[in-house]
Image (tube, rainbow, N blue to C red):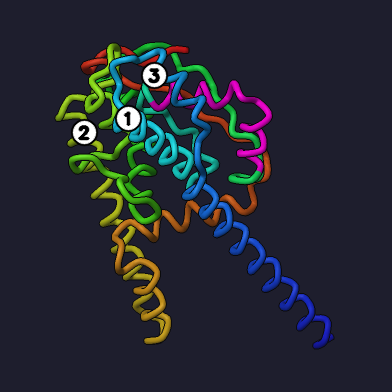
């Protein structure tokens, strides 16, 4: 009986190690992936006023969105940027390459869904739908350089910074609302973690500090990340945003 138990434990540890290694490889792939130059050219045709710096920012914003999905694959995240969404469309049209990318980055196809019916972005419903995207974007600070632009997640600041026509812009009060909700959730997670660890040994406490002490957001991010290991089904996301606090996006 004892040898069988040991074998089960060893198998469990092996599976856990494989999943951890797979997640690390996926992250490195996302961090280092180079988008084909054709996608940037397609974006420039739609927005000829963009310079190379803005086009590069659009690529980093789309990378941020992909890392957001890597962190929270079971959450249907809203796309906050029209410019990043246009780049995503250009990538999707390269069907074979996009499929290969998704398989290597996520282990499944990451589908694009049309936006929901247009609503006022300042309403409670629209604000609540976008909150998970804000939270996930904030979590990417741990995994990519340039995750914030002027203290705002790049995806939420991109359209205003690029000054594109019809960009999805967000009023300061809405940005402040998302930031406050994220800070409150992070503080609650930190308090909960401290309460849970209060009865553990000093070595356990030290390990917990290594995982989340240096980043106020990392505990939640790692929880979202670990949930992906058991999710092998196709995932999807929809576009959503506001134009000067106005309507949501549509494809």
Q: Is residue 176 left or right of residue 201?
A: left
Mark 1 = which residue?
52
The span from disc 3 to disc 1 (Cα, nearest Å) is: 9 Å
Splitting the image into 4 quarters, where does residue 150 fall?
top left
In which quadrant is the N terminus drawn?
Answer: bottom right
The vertical placement of 138 against 212, above or below, is above
- Point out the tag, 3 or 2, that comes first from the N-terminus: 3
Q: Is residue 97 magenta?
A: yes
Few, some or many residues within 10 Å of mark 2 (<14, 14–19, 20+)? some
* Residue 157 vs residue 204, the one in the foreground: 157
Which mark is on residue 44? Answer: 3
On the image, the x and y values in percent for residue 93 come to: 59, 21
Q: Is residue 29 left or right of residue 195?
A: right
On the image, the x and y values in percent for residue 132 come to: 38, 38
As drawn, the residue found furthest toward the left would be 172
Which mark is on residue 175? Answer: 2
Q: Which residues are magenta?
A: 84-103
- Point out the tag, 3 or 1, that comes first from the N-terminus: 3
């Amino acid at each position: 009986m004892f040898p069988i138990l040991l074998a089960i434990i060893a198998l469990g540890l092996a599976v856990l190690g494989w999943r951890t290694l797979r997640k690390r490889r996926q992250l490195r792939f996302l961090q280092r992936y180079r988008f084909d130059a054709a996608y940037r050219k397609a974006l420039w045709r739609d927005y000829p006023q963009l310079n190379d710096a803005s086009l590069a920012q659009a690529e980093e914003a789309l990378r941020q969105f992909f890392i957001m999905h890597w962190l929270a694959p079971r959450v249907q995240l809203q796309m906050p940027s029209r410019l990043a969404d246009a780049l995503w469309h250009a990538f999707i049209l390269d069907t074979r390459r996009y499929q290969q990318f998704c398989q290597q980055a996520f282990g499944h196809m990451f589908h694009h869904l049309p936006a929901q019916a247009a609503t006022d972005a300042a309403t409670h419903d629209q604000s609540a739908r976008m909150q998970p995207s804000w939270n996930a974007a904030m979590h990417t600070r741990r995994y990519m350089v340039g995750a914030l632009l002027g203290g705002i997640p790049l995806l939420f600041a991109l359209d205003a910074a690029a000054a594109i026509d019809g960009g999805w812009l967000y009023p300061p009060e809405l940005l402040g609302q998302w930031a406050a909700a994220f800070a409150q959730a992070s503080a609650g997670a930190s308090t909960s973690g401290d309460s849970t660890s209060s009865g553990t040994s000093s070595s356990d406490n030290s390990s917990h500090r290594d995982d989340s002490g240096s980043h106020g957001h990392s505990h939640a991010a790692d929880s979202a990340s670990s949930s992906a290991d058991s999710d092998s089904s196709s995932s999807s996301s929809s576009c959503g945003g506001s134009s000067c606090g106005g309507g949501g996006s549509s494809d």
